[in-house]
Image (spheres, rainbow, N blue to C red):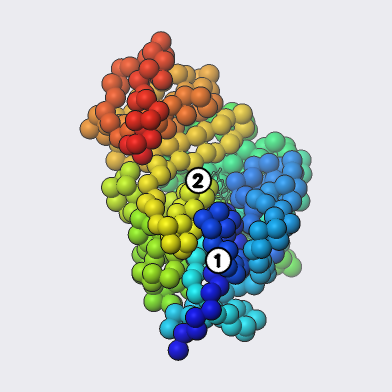
Amino acid sequence: MAHTEEHIYVIGAGHAGGETAFALRQQGYAGPLTVIGEEAHVPYQRPPLSKAYLKGDCEAPSLYLRQPAAYEKANIGLLLSRRVERIDRASKKLVLDDGRELNYSKLALATGGRARRITINDAARAERTSNFHYLRTIDDVNAIRSRFQSGQRLVVVGGGYIGLEVAASAIASDVHVTVLEALPRVLARVTAPQMSEFYEQVHRNAGVDLRTNIEVTGLDFNAAGDAVTAVHCSGGVVIPADFVVVGIGLLPNTEIAQAAGLDVDNGIVVDEHAATSDPDIAAAGDCTNHPSVFCGRRIRLESVPNAVEQARVAAAYLAGKPRVYDSVPWFWSDQYDLKLQMTGLSQGYDQFVLRGSMQNKSFAAFYLKEGRLIACDAVNRAQEFMVAKRMVAACQPFDPVALADESVPLKTLAPPVQAAAAAN
Ligand code: FAD
């Protein structure tokens, strides 16, 4: 028999979890509220983990989204270094990894994701060494950044955003970097060949040994077996390594939701209000598969803006004030002196329009589909990016010639601010 006492628990103390808790307070929920997280830290920003924090330019407390005192002030409980092992929906109980059971009235799942593991034969052995790394948490980066010393040889597996950001950060510390990408080009899943070529050139110019169409097949270990010494690749290539960082994507943490009988399909399935298939449970962030008004289909996103904005929608739902999550996806990546900002999703584009100069490292790439603008990647064009966000959100056709013409200010092409807000 389910109990009736009110207590909302947020499972996962990441970007979405922290935001959900504070948004619940902002939405007027004044009852008992606790965030449970398996990491030892209060919710923190992950983007600097492959950028400033990896380079040693800042320390952990500066990554915290809010300092611990803010949780106390808002009367939000924090249960850290604790994992929720099971959700019993029939009795509305959570079971923790120390065996404790907690009664909930409502739940928010903000379980995020974990680094995808490499599937070569030597993987398990490599994961027990001290110089073979994945990158998702502060603790992961603490282990990596101590190795950033001049002359050290780093092999990065994966030419996605995280792999490339790690490469750029390592180069800044005078580390010798090799990047291995299995596909024919870097960033292949998220951007156009022209953008991949641009980034490949930038990395090579910076001194990165960047190789595409190459797969990791095995590893060498030292005599003691406690360190990887080389990476074996397709074609018989062997690359000596002092340390290895693998950045090959993310797996959403959906296991406890699935075991609890919630709908899961590449993410915890939620509706436009961030509600799961159980009306007392919402979910937000990297772990969700949600309907996108903008894309006209279900998507799962891995980005801070999605985690924050969907968390607010989840909180509104749990507070009894449902509203529709209808944000346009956006994301950023910092590498060297390049600030890349992206809005929309470019998959399925049939026209690529360049505004500005790749050579001067200042441009916006527009993606159109049947004349309609569906995405924009802007490099070192922060002001134009703000305008492009409005244009992409408007879901309407734009003249490709005008988009490319720098003598035409972008803002003269964009819909008025209010019209774009209404369209969004
Ligand atoms: P997470 O941040 O993964 O948080 C989920 C938390 O829940 C984790 O702490 C996890 O341990 C915990 N948890 C899971 N299961 C349980 C359980 N059963 N019990 C208790 N706790 C649990 N995005 C951008 O927009 N721009 C960037 O430049 C960018 N750079 C990035 C660089 C790196 C290195 C990484 C790793 C990510 C980057 N991202 C970036 C992505 C962004 O950080 C994520 O989209 C965001 O952190 C998602 O937040 P989340 O709360 O959904 O998930």
- Note whether residue 334 is visible: yes
Q: Nearer the viewer, mark 2 or mark 1?
A: 1
Residue 73, quarter of the rendered image: bottom right
Confirm if mark 2 falls within 8 A of ligand 1: yes
Q: Quadrant of ligand 1?
A: bottom right
Q: Does residue 88 sit above or below 388 in this rendering?
A: below
Q: Which residue is mark 1?
A: 10
| Left or right of 133 in this view: 191 | left
Query: CB atoms at circles 2 and 1 under 8 Å apart?
Result: no
| Left or right of 416 in this view: 238 | right
Three-letter code for the amino acid on which mark 1 is drawn = Val
Question: Who's the residue at 35% across and 59% down the image?
Answer: 271
Q: Closer to the N terminus: mark 2 or mark 1? A: 1
78 or 307, nearer to the observer: 78
| Left or right of 106 in this view: 390 | left
Question: Who's the residue at 33% across and 17% down the image?
Answer: 402
Q: Position of residue 390 (x, y in %)?
A: 40, 31
| Mark carried by residue 77 | none
Q: Which residue is mark 2?
A: 305
Question: Who's the residue at 34% across and 49% down the image?
Answer: 292
Mark 1 crowd level (few <14, some 14–19, many ≥20, 10 Å Cα): many
Quadrant in which the N terminus appears:
bottom left
Q: CA distance from mark 2 to mark 1?
A: 19 Å
Q: Secondary structure at mark 2?
A: helix
Q: Position of residue 206 (x, y in %)?
A: 62, 31
125 or 16, nearer to the observer: 16
- Note whether residue 179 is visible: no
Quadrant in which the C terminus appears:
top left
Three-letter code for the amino acid on which mark 2 is drawn = Pro
Please identify the residue farthest to the bottom as the structure is shown.
Answer: 1
Q: Secondary structure at mark 1?
A: strand
Q: Position of residue 335 (x, y in %)?
A: 59, 35
